[in-house]
Image (cartoon, rainbow, N blue to C red):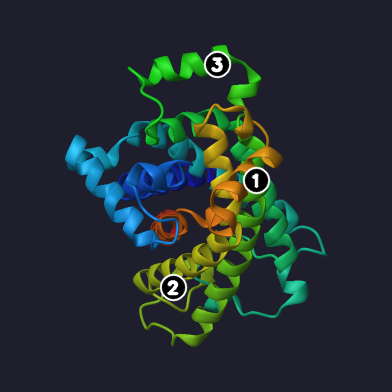
Amino acid sequence: MSNVSQHLLSGALSGFASTIILQPFDLLKTRIQQPDQLNKLRLSPLAPQSTFIFRTARDIVQNDGLVGLWRGTTASLLRNVPGVAMYFTGLNQFRAFLATSPYFARLRAQRTPDAYSTSTLPKLTAQGNLLAGALTRVTVGLVLNPFSVIKARYESSYHSYSSLSGAFIGLMRAGPSEIFRGAVASSLRDAPYAGIFVVFYEQIKSTLSHAIPASPDATVVTGMPFAHSMSMSTAINSASAASAGALATLATQPFDVLKTKMQVRSEAKYRGVGSTIRAVWQQRGVAGFFDGATLRISRKVFSSAIGWAVYEGVLMAFRTSSVKEQD
């Protein structure tokens, strides 16, 4: 299997696993971020966010049963499986390209022994990781924005579609203004999120790799020794991704709120980024820009841990298997 195929398959498996397991988090986040959710739940704007989450989840289960928490899973899979596959593959290709540059090549800026690596991915400076993460994420987000719109609307309580194909056809007929609804807000969220995530992920992973003693059953992949076993490498990658996901999510939460409102609501005040900011501020003040933050952080922590562990684990398995076949 080619290198690109390995990254596509690893990314697709990562997106599938995290989507199936964590869809309820996405559903509840979308419902919480709906502008009139507080009025519907008859709660004070000062009530703890956990109260909104509990009441929303209870209403969904009462109306649709436990399976209702997985509403929109098919739409999420259509967005996330190819999206994660394209993101991981594009990120690897872009990082490999940047690694050829004297400015972005990590070994020119930092002397870190390869033996402590838990990854087969290219190594870059912080600037390289920031640039690669941001540009790759924004590019993939723009390409798949129609699926993001459908996903958000399936998860909301404002839209009721008879079929996924009907929803997609209707969106396409509505024209570019609907197809790329919320794309600017998504880019403002995704660029800093992905950049911050990759920088923190690589830094935390490097720190943990050096802090944890070497394993006696370490493997050798593509001629490079690994100081940790496959299971320890997976644990290090999971912990690093979870920590990076939490930090990046908190920093970009306001843009996620704007993106969701613009994609779900059809009123004129949600047509542009500036008008949506004003609407959120008038309704909820500063707190409104962090609606659903608890759910999004929880979701991102778990999805990052699962996604990157599966992705890097599958890649290491491919490389280890290839080395054994050559021997």
Asked if labels 1 and 3 touch by Cβ distance under 8 angstroms, the answer is no
Residue plotted at (60% across, 30% down)? 181
Q: Amino acid at mark 1?
A: Ile
> What is the distance, in whole Å, between disc 3 and disc 2 at their CAs?
43 Å
Q: Which residue is mark 2?
A: 236
Q: Give the secondary structure at mark 2.
A: helix
Horizontal and vertical percent position of residue 67: 20, 39
Asked if labels 1 and 2 touch by Cβ distance under 8 angstroms, the answer is no
Upstream in sequence: badge 3 or badge 1? 3
**Left or right of residue 313: residue 124:** right
Q: Which residue is mark 1?
A: 277
Residue plotted at (71% across, 69% down)? 106
Q: Let me know if residue 61 appears in the view.
A: yes
Number of marks? 3
Q: Specify the label residue 172 is tagged with.
A: 3
Horizontal and vertical percent position of residue 68: 24, 38
Q: Give the secondary structure at mark 1.
A: helix
Q: From the viewer's perspective, is residue 245 above or below residue 110?
A: above
Q: Let me know if residue 86 appears in the view.
A: no
Horizontal and vertical percent position of residue 287: 53, 59
> What is the distance, in whole Å, between disc 3 and disc 1 at their CAs?
27 Å
**Left or right of residue 68: residue 2:** right
Upstream in sequence: badge 2 or badge 1? 2
> What is the distance, in whole Å, between disc 2 and disc 1 at their CAs?
38 Å
